[in-house]
Image (cartoon, rainbow, N blue to C red):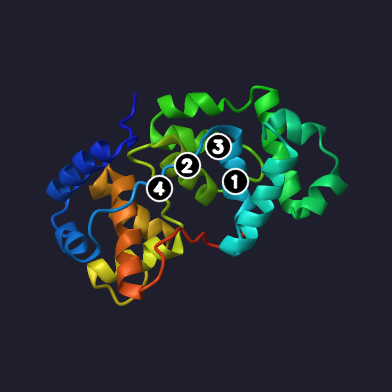
Amino acid sequence: MPARIDTEHHLKEALEKLLVLDPRFAEVVALAGHPPMRRREGGFSGLARIICGQQLSVASAAAIWGRLEAKFSPLDHHAILKARTPQLQRIGLSMPKIRTFRHIARAVRDQHLNIDALAHMPAEAAHAELVKVKGIGPWTADIYLMFCVGHADAFASGDLALQEAARMMLRKRKRPDAKQLEKIARIWKPYRSVAARLLWAYYAAMKKRDGVPVEQGEEKQ
């Protein structure tokens, strides 16, 4: 089974190993401190929440999510498949997000996507399973694996804040793109999710703002 980041102890151990792999992170830790866990609920609901929040302010996403949870209990694939489009629109979901919710719900129903099995796969294999589903892009898959599943080696190379943090840490003039950051991050395997947490914290410290994931553009929907 792949290494997991399920507790603060797991995170501390993985951080120590990451510092051995790449001592440059010592400067990051000195400035940003110990990175936060930021674990989230998994399953269909966890995946839906990530999609719900894309391209929205934190407040707007929280309001829409609150209405979804109030309307559907439990918020699972059965509930989404039964819901009517006007009902979901009144809650605040856009049509692209409604379509994505339904694509995922059908994939779960038809057993094309086994969400529970993702925790037992290597990060790359789990990522590949997620992006097979229409509407789930690479950023969504990586964020889900990092924060909802707890994969120690998941890494969102398409995240703009990670790219900028890596540029600052490595003292590069130009921000690396997703492919370049993926190559840079190879040295951090199998603890890339810890590297990501550190880089987000570093970004927050350097920019004096919340170190949160920032997806690169719209997901495919």
Please name the residue shown 29% across and 53% down the image.
Answer: 35
**Residue name at image x 75 percent, y 55 percent:** 92
Amino acid tagged 4: Arg
Task: Give the CA distance from mark 3 to mark 1.
Answer: 15 Å
Per the rendering, the mark at residue 38 is 4
x and y, in percent, of residue 133 in the image: 63, 38
User: For mark 3, what is the residue?
Assistant: 130
Q: Earlier in the sequence, mark 4 or mark 3?
A: 4
Q: First in sequence: mark 4 or mark 1? A: 4
Q: Say which amino acid is labelled 3.
A: Leu
Residue with the mark numbered 2: 40
Looking at the image, residue 133 lies above or below residue 25:
above
The local crowd at label 1, few if under 14, some if 14 to 19, many if 20 or more residues have their Cα within 10 Å, is many
Can the viewer see residue 220? no
Task: Tell me if residue 63 comes above or below residue 189 in the rendering.
Answer: below
Q: Secondary structure under badge 3?
A: helix
Type of amino acid under label 2: Arg
What is the spatial separation of the Cα atoms under label 2 and label 4, in whole angstroms?
6 Å
Q: Which mark is residue 49?
A: 1
Q: Quadrant of residue 200?
A: bottom left
Discs 2, 1 touching: Cβ within 8 Å: yes
